Image (cartoon, helix red, strand yellow):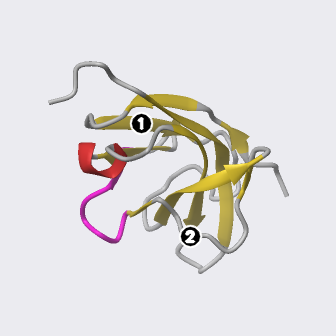
């Protein structure tokens, strides 16, 4: 099994953001068509999710808002983070994306640190 990609990124708190993930793993073939994508961000300690704590942000391609699967190849999806998702978050969070393919196989395809930065010009 191939290791998940490490993809770190930063977003400003209390702002809308779209984060694009390119999956280099071949665990789901060459397309995300027919797959379900889950993405979660968690409080973290030493780069690992805090045990027993629910996600601070949770998105799924099933919800109709939050994850958009783009044309494949390349295998790419976007996570839409609304201002309300990050308004009270200021620090580093562990994030992870999991794909469930059409056969029900589950693969973690990307992990990393999401940094939510402070902004001076809040309304």
Magenta stretch encompasses residue 65: yes
Q: Residue furthest bottom?
A: 104
Which quadrant of the structure image shows residue 60? bottom left
Which quadrant of the structure image shows residue 51? bottom right
Q: Quick check: can you spot residue 74? A: yes
Q: Are marks 1 and 2 in contact (CB under 8 Å)?
A: no
Q: In which quadrant is the N terminus drawn? A: bottom right
The region drawn magenta spans 61-71
Pinpoint residue 72: horizontal percent, then vertical percent. Answer: 44, 44
Q: Main secondary structure of the magenta part?
A: loop
Q: Residue at x 32, y 35 (%)?
A: 17
Q: Tell me the residue that label 1 is attached to.
A: 19
- Of mark 1 and mark 2, the one earlier in the sequence is 1
Q: Tell me the residue that label 2 is attached to.
A: 101
Q: Quick check: can you spot residue 69? A: no
Which quadrant of the structure image shows residue 23? top right
Q: Nearer the viewer, residue 94 or 26?
A: 94
Q: CA distance from mark 1 to mark 2?
A: 21 Å
Q: Nearer the viewer, residue 2 or 64?
A: 64
Q: Is residue 31 left or right of residue 5?
A: left
User: Disc 1 on helix, strand or loop?
Assistant: strand
Q: Residue at x 47, y 38 (%)?
A: 90
Q: Residue at x 54, y 30 (%)?
A: 9
Vertical position of residue 17 compared to residue 121: above or below: below
């Amino acid at each position: 099994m191939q290791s998940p990609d490490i993809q770190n990124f930063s977003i400003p708190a209390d702002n809308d953001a779209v984060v694009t993930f390119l999956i280099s793993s071949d665990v789901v073939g060459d397309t995300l068509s027919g797959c379900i994508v889950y993405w979660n961000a968690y409080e973290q300690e030493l780069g690992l999710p805090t045990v027993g704590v629910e996600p601070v942000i949770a998105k799924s391609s099933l919800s109709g808002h939050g994850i958009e699967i783009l044309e494949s190849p390349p295998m790419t999806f976007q996570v839409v983070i609304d201002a309300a998702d990050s308004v009270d978050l200021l620090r580093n969070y562990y994030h992870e994306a999991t794909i469930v393919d059409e056969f029900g196989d589950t693969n973690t395809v990307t992990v990393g640190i999401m940094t939510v930065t402070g902004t001076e010009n809040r309304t």
